[in-house]
Image (tube, grey):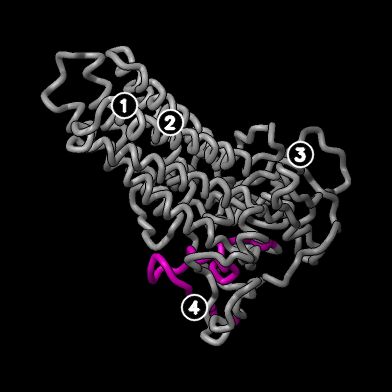
């Protein structure tokens, strides 16, 4: 299968790479793939009792977004008599239900990517509540109560903007702590119950992401047994001496900014999000009842509505960059990628918040109605995108069907050999 590197914008760093991990085996006990007789119908991939599937080969899919979030994606080619056993594709019913259940029962608060999703999810919830305060009185005046818009809307706007600001700070921390070395994150082991097969399982032994540090939210982690210190450009020698992986930094150096981060689409998207959230927070601060009541109408336009328009426009730029990061070409959408939907829903929310600020300049009941309505659907769009991001943060080992392999590809016997350099690695965290 072919290897490739994806660069949606020519002057920035690649956003995705694909390389083979395993190819068909010629071991004596390996099952045959083709008996030489013509087949009357395409072979169908076998599914084992535990839900795993037989696959013909495996490719490592490195993506810059997945890399920031500690995810290890692989592409597999299902086959009727494959050489390997792999988990089922992540977009099938059983894995989806399992991950939805984990969203309710698993709380990895040490994982910065999980915390990013949590801050934006609960911030969006607050904005949904805010939208009812500011929009419902325009739709049903009989439901209004004293101070609903001024106090309820103002206080929730401040809380929501503050939560978005904190989430954006975590987003920047996540961006500057991306893993510079590609780690496989999987390991092969003998499937004793299936003669001649290798089983592919998630493995923390082969991972160098900081997300595995469960001791605290910030900081480096100890080197797994037998693993050398991670070598990074510009890395201090103290990490090698202390036998720690340099998996955490607070601020990148100027050299790193100039030569690496400013060429990363994901970092630029996070930076745009942080700047926009900071400007948008001004609107949340000036929405507080005591401040709002002391401002003149012209001051409200400049200190309240303008930060919403500017901040919302920054959210639009950030969302577009996040979508671009997941696309093969700058003009080609990627609806098969979960991260693309995160950016797409956030784009809808960003447009809503920008329009809300713009309608604020339309003084009168009609302007209040349109501004509240834009906040309503914009906050719901942000909530949907944040829940997708929450789901994404918990799926650290996504499995995809190899799109380049066709349907149920059967490769003739004796093509290539299995890479055994990772065979026998310890089974790691399967979360």
Secondary structure category for the residue under label 4: strand
Secondary structure category for the residue under label 2: helix
Q: Which residue is mark 4?
A: 222
The CA span between labels 2 and 3 is 47 Å
Q: Which mark is residue 298?
A: 1
7 or 288, nearer to the observer: 288
The CA span between labels 1 and 4 is 57 Å
The residue under the point 62% across, 44% down is: 325
Secondary structure category for the residue under label 3: loop
Secondary structure category for the residue under label 1: helix
Q: Which residue is mark 3?
A: 406
Q: Nearer the viewer, mark 1 or mark 4?
A: 1
The answer to whether residue 186 shows anywhere in this view is no
The CA span between labels 4 and 2 is 45 Å
The residue under the point 35% across, 23% down is: 360
Q: Which residues are magenta?
A: 197-226
């Amino acid at each position: 299968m072919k290897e490739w590197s994806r660069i949606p914008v020519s002057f920035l760093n690649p956003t995705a790479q694909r390389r083979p991990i395993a190819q068909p085996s010629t071991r004596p006990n390996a099952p045959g793939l083709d008996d030489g007789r013509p087949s009357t119908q395409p072979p169908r991939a076998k599914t084992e009792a535990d839900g795993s599937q037989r696959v013909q080969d495996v490719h490592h899919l490195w993506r810059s977004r997945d890399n920031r979030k500690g995810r290890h994606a692989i592409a597999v080619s299902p086959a009727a008599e494959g050489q390997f056993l792999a988990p089922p594709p992540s977009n099938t019913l059983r894995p989806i239900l399992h991950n939805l259940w984990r969203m309710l029962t698993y709380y990895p608060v040490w994982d910065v990517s999980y915390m990013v999703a949590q801050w934006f999810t609960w911030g969006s919830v607050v904005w949904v509540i805010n939208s009812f305060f500011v929009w419902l009185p325009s739709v049903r005046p009989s439901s209004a109560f004293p101070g609903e818009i001024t106090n309820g809307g103002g206080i929730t706007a401040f809380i929501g903007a503050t939560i978005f600001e904190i989430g954006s700070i975590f987003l920047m921390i996540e961006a500057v702590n991306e893993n510079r070395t590609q780690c496989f994150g999987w390991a092969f082991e003998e499937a004793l119950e299936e003669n001649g097969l290798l089983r592919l399982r998630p493995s923390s032994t082969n991972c160098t992401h900081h997300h595995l540090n469960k001791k605290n939210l910030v900081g480096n982690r100890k080197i797994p047994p037998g693993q050398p210190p991670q070598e990074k450009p510009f890395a201090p020698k103290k990490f090698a001496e202390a036998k720690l992986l340099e998996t955490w930094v607070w601020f990148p150096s100027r050299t790193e900014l100039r030569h690496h981060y400013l060429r990363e689409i994901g970092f630029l998207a996070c930076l745009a999000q942080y700047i926009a959230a900071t400007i948008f927070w001004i609107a949340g601060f000036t929405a507080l009842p005591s401040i709002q009541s002391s401002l003149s109408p012209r001051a409200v336009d400049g200190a309240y509505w303008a930060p919403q328009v500017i901040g919302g426009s920054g959210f639009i730029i950030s969302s577009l960059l996040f979508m671009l990061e997941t696309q093969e070409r700058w003009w080609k959408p990627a609806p098969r990628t979960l991260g693309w939907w995160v950016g797409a829903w956030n784009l809808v929310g960003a447009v809503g918040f920008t329009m809300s600020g713009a309608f604020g300049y339309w003084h009168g009941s009609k302007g209040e109605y349109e501004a509240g309505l834009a906040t309503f659907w914009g906050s719901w769009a942000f909530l949907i995108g944040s829940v997708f991001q929450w789901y994404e943060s918990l799926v650290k080992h996504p499995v995809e069907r190899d799109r380049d392999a066709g349907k149920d590809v059967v490769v003739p016997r004796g093509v290539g050999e299995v890479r055994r350099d990772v065979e026998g690695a310890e089974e790691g965290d399967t979360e």
